[in-house]
Image (spheres, rainbow, N blue to C red):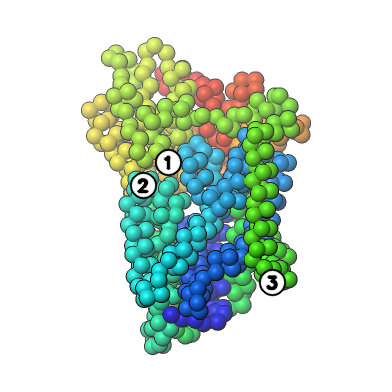
Amino acid sequence: MNDRSYRPDIDGLRALAIVPVVLYHVGMRGCFGGFVGVDVFFVISGYLITGILVRELDRGGISLRDFYRRRVLRIFPALFTMLAACAAIAWATMLPGEFAAFARSTSATALFSSNLFFWRESGYFAPAAHSIPLLHTWSLAVEEQFYLFWPLILMAVPRAGRRWLPWLAAAIAAASFAAAAWQLPRDPTAAFYLIHARTWELMVGALLVWVPARAFASRALREAVALAGLAAILFAVKSYNQDTPFPGPAALLPVAGAAAILVAGASGGSLAGRLLSLRPLVFIGAISFSLYLWHWPVIVFSQTVLYLEQTAAVRCGIVVVSLLLAVASWRLVETPFRAGGSASWPARLVLRRAALLMALFLASSSITVAARGFPDRFDAPQQAIGAYEDYAGDRAYRAGSCFVVQPGDAFDASTCLARDPGKRGVLIVGDSHAAHLWPGLHAAAGADVNVLQATATGCRPVLAPIAAREPACRAFFRNLFVDWLPSHPVDVVVLAGRWQTPDLELLGATVAQLQGHAGRIVVVGPVPQYAAALPRLLVKALRSNDSGSVARGLVRAEFALDAQMRDLVSHTPARYFSMIDALCRNGSCRNYAAPGIPMQFDYGHFTIEGSRVAGADLMATLR
C-alpha cells in the first residue's frame, strides 16, 4: 500500500475533472463529454478516502466518529452555504409549485439522498434540468452513501482476513459494474443516479491503495501509463456526448484514465504528473469542490431568474462568476473550517452541530412543502398562471400508448395508427414537439380526417446515421417508415421535433425515404422557445407590469433555425410550416391560448389549449 504525502498532481487531476464538467454544463463546444469529470472525481475520492481508512486500520482501527467529523468539516460548510444562498433566491423568485419542489430537493440534499430524489422525480415532463438548482448534488449523495457502508465493511473484516481486502474490493467493483451494464439499457436514469451502478467507480480508486508503491518504478512505463490516462480522459471529454450510453461500459475510459494517473503518480514523477502539477491547475483543483457546488446554481438562475439566452458571452460570464464564487467560498468558508480553529473541534461537537444544521434545513423545507410553496406571495391570477408549471403534459399527449416516454413503454400501433376506411390519414411523427401537436390536430381534424400519431421521447424524425446515437429511436423510425408505412400509405406525413442543427443535413434523406408513401410531406419548424418556463415569465411580467419581459425571454436561436429549415425544405418535395410565423409577429410571440391560459407550460411544450391554437393553423394547411 502506498503512503505518500501531498501530491499536487491529484489537485491537477481534480482540475481536469471540474473544468470539463463546468464547460459541459454551460454548453461549450468541444466539451460535450465533460460529464465524465464526475467519474474522475469518484475515482479520486475512492482512492484518497480508502487510503486514509486503510492506514487507520493498520494503526489499530478506524474511528467512525473521527472519520465522519472530517467528512463534515470537509463537506458541510460550503454545501450548506450554497443551500442557504439558493433558498434565499428561490424564496424571492420561484413560483409556489417550484418553491415546494425546491424545498423537497433541499431536504433530500441535506440528508444526502438527492440522487434518490432526482431519480424518483425524473420523467420527460419533469422540470427541465436547467431549472433545478440542486440537481448537481446527486453526486455528493452517491459519495456520502458510499462512505456510510465502506468504512463498516473495512471494520468488519477481522485482522487475519485483511489480506483479502483487495479481493473483496474487486468483487464489489465487479458486481457494481455488472449491475450498471445490465441496468443501463433497461433503466438509464437509475443507472445514472443510483449508488449500485456507481460504486464500482469509487471502488476502482479504492483498489489503487493496495497497488505496491513501486509498481511503476520503470520511468518509461510510468510515463506511458500516465500519458495514456491523460489521453483517455481528454478523449472521453471530446468524443462523448449526451447520447453516449452512460455510465456503463463507456465509463471505463475516464475511470481507467484517472486510475492510471493516480497509480503512476504514486510511483514517481512523469510528464503528465508535471503538467497536472502546474500552479494554475493545482489552484483550480483546490477550489474544485466549491466550483462544483456553485457553478450549477449560477447556470440555473441565469436562465430562471435573469432569463438569459445561453449565448457565448453569457456562457463565458457564467464561468467567470462561478470561479469568483468558488474562490470566495474556498477562502471564506472551506479553508477556515479545514485549517482554522474549528479543525480542532472534538468529534462530538462537530457531529452535534452537523445534526442541528441538517435539522434546521429539514424543518424549514418541511414547512415550505406543507405551506405548498407559500402561494400567498402571489395574487390569484398569478397563482393560476403559475400552476401551469405543474401541467401533466405527458398525459395530454397520450403518453404510454402513442407517445413513448419511458424506455419500457410499448407503442400501441393498433390504437395510434388506426384509420377508418374512406377518411384521410394524417400521420404526425417525431418527438415531444410532435406529440404536443396531437391534441390540436385531433380537435381541428373534422369528421373526414383520422390523425395518426407515432411519437417518442427525444426522437427527432430523421432516418440517417445520426439516429444511431439512440438505438431506440433508430428502431422506432425503422419500424414506422420502412416496415409499416409502405404497406399503409397515408395522405399526409407531418414531421415535427425539437430540431437541432445537425438534423438539417439529414432531413432531405428522410423526405426522400417517405416519398411515394404519402400524398404530402409537411415539415413543421421549431416552436417558439423560452429561456425559462413561459408561466414563470408571464407571472414576472404581471408582477412588474412589464409585458415586454416575456419577449426578452425568447430564445432567438430558434428564429435563425426556422429560417435555415425553410430554405432547406424549399429544395425538397416537402412543404414547410413555420410555427414561428404562425405564432410570432415583430419579435414577440403569442403567450396566451385564452385568457389566463398560457400557450406553453414549460420552455416550449403546448398546453392543450395552446395545441388547439397551433393545430388549427397547421390543419388548415393540410386540407
**288 in relation to 512, above or below:** below
Task: Please tell me whether residue 64 is drawn above or below residue 228 in the rendered image.
Answer: above
Residue 344 numbered mark, or none:
3
**Which secondary structure lies at badge 1?**
loop
Q: Quadrant of residue 197?
A: bottom left
Q: Is residue 605 left or right of residue 286?
A: left
Determine whether label 2 and label 1 are within 8 Å by CB: yes
Q: Position of residue 547 (x, y in %)?
A: 72, 31
Q: CA distance from mark 2 to mark 3?
A: 53 Å
Position of 576 compared to 488: left or right?
right
Q: Amino acid at mark 3?
A: Ser
Name the residue that disc number 1 marks.
458
Q: Quadrant of residue 363?
A: top right
Q: Can you tell which of label 2 and label 3 is closer to the viewer? A: 3
The residue beneath circle 2 is: 470
Whether residue 185 appears in this view of the structure is yes
